[in-house]
Structures are given as C-alpha cells and as structure tokens.
Image (cartoon, grey):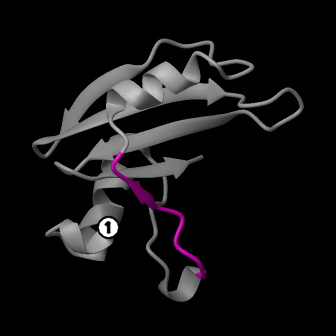
Amino acid sequence: MRNLINLTNEKIEELFDEAFGVDGYMGGEYGEANVVFTSDTFESFIQTSKNYNECPYNPELDEIDGFKTLLMKKCQVRKGDQRQDVCIIDFGDIRGVVLS
C-alpha cells in the first residue's frame, strides 16, 4: 500500500511530526517502521473505537499541508492494554496510522 502514496518517506515522517508531534519513522536506523498503511476510512476508525474498552476523547479532525488528519486520544482497545493515541493521516485512497 505504501507504493500508492506519492510522497517520500521523509515527507511522511515530517507530516506525522508536524501534525501530531510523533515520530512516524519509516525504518532505516530506527528499525521497523511504525507507520502502518491501511485502506480503512476515518469513519471506520471512529466506528471501531466505539467498541474499545475506552476512547474517552472525541476524535479530532484537522488538516496538515492539504492532508486530512484524525487524532483519537488515549484509546484503550482492551482492558489492561496501554492507552495510546491513534494518529491518522489520509493520503487519498490510503491512510497512514501511528500509535503513540
């Protein structure tokens, strides 16, 4: 799916940093990439979050450099799991996701 996004790895990393203040690194010296690419829509992420054990904050929609973003704060998928922010950038047909 990564090949469907016409941006460099560096630009994708930069967008995650600017939008969410998180390292959206794509591999290299850091090891495995932490950006996951999916065709799931913002709506499907929001709908799925209703089944999480906790997702206490309303989803925050925004935009960075013409790309729509979605932030869901302090989500806990299952009881006992660590709470994480779900940071998503919409690249058109594909979304990039980082858990922080």
Q: Name the residue nearer the viewer: 46 or 31.
A: 46
Residue 3 x/y as whole percent? 24, 75
Q: Residue at x 52, y 72 (%)?
A: 33
Image side of residue 87 versus residue 48, left or right:
left
Label 1: few (<14), some (14–19) or many (≥20) C-alpha neighbours in 10 Å: few
Q: In the displayed structure, would residue 31 be above or below residue 73?
A: below
Report if residue 38 lies within the magenta region: yes
Outermost residue, bottom side: 29
Report if residue 16 lies within the magenta region: no
Residue 87 x/y as whole percent? 45, 41
Q: In the displayed structure, would residue 99 be above or below residue 81?
A: below
Query: Please, what is the three-letter code of the amino acid marked with disc 1?
Result: Met
Q: Which residues are magenta?
A: 31-39
Q: Residue at x 75, y 20 (%)?
A: 53
Q: Residue at x 70, y 18 (%)?
A: 54
Q: Quadrant of residue 64 in the image?
A: top left
**Helix or strand or loop: what does disc 1 sit on?**
loop
Image side of residue 41 versus residue 29, left or right:
left
Q: Name the residue nearer the viewer: 4 or 18.
A: 4
Q: In the displayed structure, would residue 7 be above or below residue 31?
A: above
**Main secondary structure along the magenta-highlighted residues:** loop
Q: Residue at x 32, y 67 (%)?
A: 1
- The residue singled out by tag 1 in the image is 1
Report the number of discs. Answer: 1
Residue 45 x/y as whole percent? 45, 30
Q: Name the residue nearer the viewer: 52 or 24.
A: 52
Q: In the displayed structure, would residue 4 be above or below residue 32?
A: above
Residue 8 x/y as whole percent? 22, 75
Outermost residue, left side: 66
